[in-house]
C-alpha cells in the first residue's frame, strides 16, 4: 500500500515521503497513529501544494537572512575591557556578550549558538566574528573592536 508520511517515522522515512509499505503496517499502525495517509490523487495534490508553500517560506527566510547579513557588514561592536601587557584581555568577550550587544544597540537577534568558531575573544584589537544566519547558506560577519578601559 502506498502512503504519504505526515511526520518522521524512525527507520521508515521522513515527513512528506511517499512509501510503499505492507497493507497491515499501513492500516494498523501508520494510519491509525496519524503518522501517514493513503496515497490517493487528492493527497498527492495536497503534498505537492505543501511542498510548494514550504519552498516559498524557505526562500523568504533566506532573503531575510541576506538582509541581516548586509546590516551586519556595516556594524562595529565596541567593547571596553581591562587589558594587560601585550594587549591580553583580563577575562574575554564571549559570543553571548556579542549577541546581547547586537540586540541592545541594533535590535538584531542572533542566537549565541550560531556563531561559527565561537571561541571567546582574548586580545585587544579588531576581530571578525562569523555567524551562521541561515542553514550554512548565509554566513554574516560582525566586526568586534575590543579596546582598553
Image: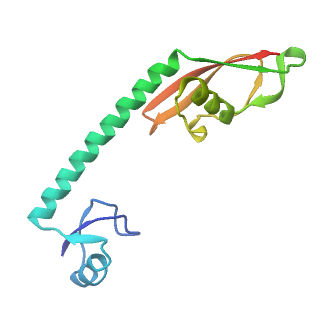
**Colour scheme used in the picture?**
rainbow
Question: Residue reaching furthest right?
Answer: 85
The percent coordinates of residue 77 (x first, y second) are 64, 19
Q: Which quadrant does the N terminus fall into?
A: bottom left
Question: Residue reaching furthest left?
Answer: 41
Residue at the spot 40% in from the left edge and 26% down from the top edge: 66
The percent coordinates of residue 35 (x first, y second) are 31, 71
Q: Is residue 105 above or below residue 5?
A: above
Q: Image quadrant of residue 30?
A: bottom left
Closest to the observer, 4 or 101: 101
Q: Is residue 124 above or below residue 139?
A: above
Closest to the observer, 107 or 35: 107
Residue at the spot 64% in from the left edge and 27% down from the top edge: 101
Q: Image quadrant of residue 145?
A: top right
Q: Which quadrant does the C terminus fall into?
A: top right
Q: Image quadrant of residue 41?
A: bottom left
Q: Is residue 144 above or below residue 92?
A: above
The percent coordinates of residue 148 (x first, y second) are 81, 15
Locate residue 131 relative to residue 148 in the image: left or right: left
Residue at the spot 86% in from the left edge and 15% down from the top edge: 86
Residue at the spot 12% in from the left edge and 67% down from the top edge: 40
Total residue callouts: 0
The percent coordinates of residue 38 (x first, y second) are 18, 72
Amino acid at each position: 500500500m502506498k502512503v504519504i508520511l505526515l511526520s518522521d517515522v524512525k527507520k521508515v522515512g521522513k515527513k512528506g515521503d511517499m512509501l510503499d509499505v505492507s497493507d497491515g503496517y499501513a492500516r494498523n499502525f501508520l494510519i491509525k497513529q496519524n503518522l501517514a495517509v493513503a496515497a490517493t490523487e487528492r493527497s498527492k495534490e495536497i503534498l505537492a501544494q505543501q511542498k510548494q508553500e514550504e519552498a516559498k517560506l524557505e526562500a523568504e527566510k533566506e532573503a531575510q537572512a541576506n538582509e541581516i547579513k548586509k546590516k551586519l557588514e556595516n556594524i562595529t561592536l565596541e567593547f571596553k575591557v581591562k587589558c594587560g601587557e601585550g594587549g591580553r584581555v583580563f577575562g574575554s568577550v564571549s559570543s553571548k556578550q556579542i549577541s546581547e550587544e547586537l540586540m541592545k544597540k541594533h535590535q538584531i537577534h542572533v542566537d549565541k549558538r550560531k556563531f561559527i568558531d565561537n571561541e571567546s575573544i582574548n586580545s585587544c584589537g579588531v576581530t571578525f566574528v562569523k555567524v551562521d544566519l541561515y542553514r550554512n547558506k548565509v554566513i554574516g560577519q560582525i566586526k568586534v573592536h575590543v579596546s582598553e578601559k
